[in-house]
């Protein structure tokens, strides 16, 4: 987790174009970008509008507890997505926890390991075991075949994640859920304003969870929501986010404090009018990266589906040859030039605490997760990306990729193949809870 640090005082960098290696920061030159370029730099709409809404909030002296700004925000989100109910919350993680509990999930729930840690923690925090299923390396989303393999008599649900805003395989997951009587929930933290075909994300499974964190392309400072088309579920979610209160002095349900505050709704409403501008900036940046990265050996830019709506908020680069060493060499070159690219979601939830101790052998069943996690770099985008930054960043990527060219790509590929052979033969065996538990340690 990054923390705030005072601005470094630096001389303006000369307009480097990265051609000669002597001009690289690794060789002592000033960084290409005088100010750090972050992944997840907040997009901020009309400040006057935000200040006006905040001023009205102070005049009303109504700061929280389902105030008028939160109610208007919820209306705008549900109208935008064409979904019946939006229940706004203080952040996406609490929204996940409340949705999981409201849906009655218990025992084991199947999730990808290749996601932000909040997806797994929201289960573990409530005494539910996250069971990690592998992903499809071409989409980075859950592989339905892998999901099927992880079902046991203790499984009560599946949480699909629309990673990078690209829709999870919703139909296949729904089919599995129906077949086995499981609850299907989606973590749509990345997917606000995205669609699957003509249907907006937010309308799949029994409910979907959104995040409006500062680093998301659309933010409400902090914030999240559960959206659903089920009336009764929406009612339960509303009770649960406010301690279970149904009117004064009357608690009718267990609950917690998951409420969105008015100032966050003010930011959300302000940024609503900025969505098209942000998406267009992201789309342009993505296209600039695509053109500039074209022809660089062994790197691939993950594309968005042209058939649906996208928010283009993540620029995801995969280093296809050379494995983790090559990825890290490119990342180091970027950081030296003040491009603070990220290796989301390395190393995968199953290799983080507490899951790496709880399930020490989980990686045996997650070869594609490990393969992808070791290869991804996420690049900065958004409305604050300076003009021509994508082209300059692509040059740094090219330099980093070329510098690391002699890395052991053959052995990396060989280990991926052997892991995948191993997993296929493991899956081919008759399966029950005992065999999987034994294998997961
Ligand atoms: N499910 C999924 C799939 C998610 O991706 C997330 C959150 C959740 C659930 C949970 O939703 P929330 O409870 O967060 O609403 C960031 C975000 O904190 C997190 O919200 C997000 N996913 C995740 C993908 O990214 P970090 O650990 O990378 O955050 P951090 O603090 O390093 O910030 C990223 C960069 O943004 C930094 O380099 C600095 C910059 N930044 C950050 C903030 C907060 C700014 O420039 N200004 C700022 O105000 O997790």
Image (cartoon, rainbow, N blue to C red):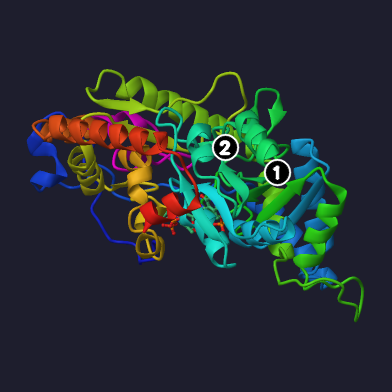
Q: Is residue 269 left or right of residue 330?
A: right
Q: Give the SS element for disc 1.
A: loop
> Disc 2 and disc 1: Cα gap in Å?
40 Å
Query: Residue at left 29%, top 32%?
Result: 421
Left or right: residue 64 compared with residue 268? right
Q: Quarter of the image for the C terminus: give it.
A: bottom left
Residue on which the image places disc 2: 278
Q: Quadrant of residue 428?
A: top left
Location of residue 436 in the rendering, given as x and y in whole percent from the top left corner: 43, 50
For the residues bearing labels 2 and 1, Cβ distance under 8 angstroms: no
In the figure, is residue 183 to the left or right of 342?
Answer: right
Residue 378 versus residue 107 in the image, above or below: above
In this view of the protein, which residue sits in the foreground, 337 or 201? 201
For the residue labelled by badge 2, is the local secondary structure a helix, a strand or a loop? Answer: helix
Q: Picture coordinates of residue 111 (x, y %)?
A: 52, 48
Mark 2 and mark 1 lie on one chain; the one further toward the N terminus is 1
* Residue found at x 31% / y 33%: 420
Between label 2 and label 1, give the one nearer the viewer: 1
Image spot of residue 206 (x, y percent)? 73, 44
Q: Nearer the viewer, residue 112 or 365?
A: 365
From this view, report whether residue 199 is shown above or below residue 362: above
Please determine whether, in this image, residue 317 is positioned above or below residue 344: above
Q: Which residue is mark 1?
A: 181
Q: Say few, some or many: other residues with alpha carbon within 10 Å of mark 1 (under 14 / 14 to 19 / 20 or more).
A: few
Q: Position of residue 320 (x, y in %)?
A: 27, 29
Residue nearer the viewer, 49 or 438: 438
Task: Tell whether position 127 is magenta.
Answer: no
Q: Which residues are magenta?
A: 373-395
Task: Give the residue at x 25% y 34%.
Answer: 416
């Amino acid at each position: 987790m990054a923390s705030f640090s005072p601005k470094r005082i630096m001389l303006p960098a000369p307009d480097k174009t990265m051609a000669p290696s002597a001009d690289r920061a690794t060789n002592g030159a000033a960084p290409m970008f005088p100010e750090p370029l972050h992944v997840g730099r907040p997009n901020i709409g009309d400040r006057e509008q935000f200040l006006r809404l905040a001023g009205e909030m102070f005049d009303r002296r109504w700061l929280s507890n389902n105030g008028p700004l939160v109610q208007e925000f919820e209306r705008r989100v549900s109208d935008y997505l064409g979904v019946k109910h939006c229940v706004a919350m203080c952040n996406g993680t609490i929204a996940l926890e409340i949705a999981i509990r409201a849906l009655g999930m218990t025992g084991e729930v199947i999730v990808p390991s290749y996601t932000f840690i909040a997806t797994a923690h929201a289960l573990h925090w409530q005494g539910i075991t996250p069971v990690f299923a592998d992903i499809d390396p071409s989409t980075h989303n859950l592989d339905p075949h892998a999901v099927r393999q992880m079902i046991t008599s203790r499984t009560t649900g599946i949480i699909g994640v629309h990673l990078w805003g690209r829709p999870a395989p919703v139909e296949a997951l729904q089919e599995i859920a129906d077949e086995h009587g499981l609850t299907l929930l989606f973590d749509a933290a990345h997917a606000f304003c995205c669609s699957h075909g003509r249907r907006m994300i937010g309308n799949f499974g029994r409910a979907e969870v959104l995040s409006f964190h500062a680093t998301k392309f659309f933010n409400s400072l902090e914030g999240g929501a559960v959206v659903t088309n089920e009336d009764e579920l929406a009612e339960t979610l509303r009770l649960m986010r406010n301690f279970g209160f149904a009117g004064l002095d009357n608690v009718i349900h267990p609950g917690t404090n998951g409420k969105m505050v008015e100032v966050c709704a003010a930011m959300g409403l302000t940024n609503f009018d900025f969505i098209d501008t942000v998406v267009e900036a992201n789309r342009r940046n993505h296209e600039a990266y695509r053109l500039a990265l074209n022809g660089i050996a062994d790197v691939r830019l993950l594309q968005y589906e042209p058939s649906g709506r996208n928010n283009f908020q993540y620029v995801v680069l995969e280093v296809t040859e050379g494995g983790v060493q090559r990825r890290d060499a490119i990342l180091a070159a970027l950081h030296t030039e003040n491009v603070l690219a990220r290796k989301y979601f390395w190393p995968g939830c199953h290799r983080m605490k507490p899951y790496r101790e709880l399930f020490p052998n989980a990686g045996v069943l997650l070869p594609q997760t490990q393969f992808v996690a070791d290869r991804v770099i996420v690049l900065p985008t958004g409305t604050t990306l300076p003009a021509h930054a994508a082209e300059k960043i692509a040059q740094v990527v090219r330099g980093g990729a070329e510098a690391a060219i002699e890395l052991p790509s053959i052995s990396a590929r060989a280990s991926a193949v052997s892991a995948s052979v191993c997993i296929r033969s493991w899956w081919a065996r008759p399966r029950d809870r005992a065999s999987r538990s034994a294998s997961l340690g």
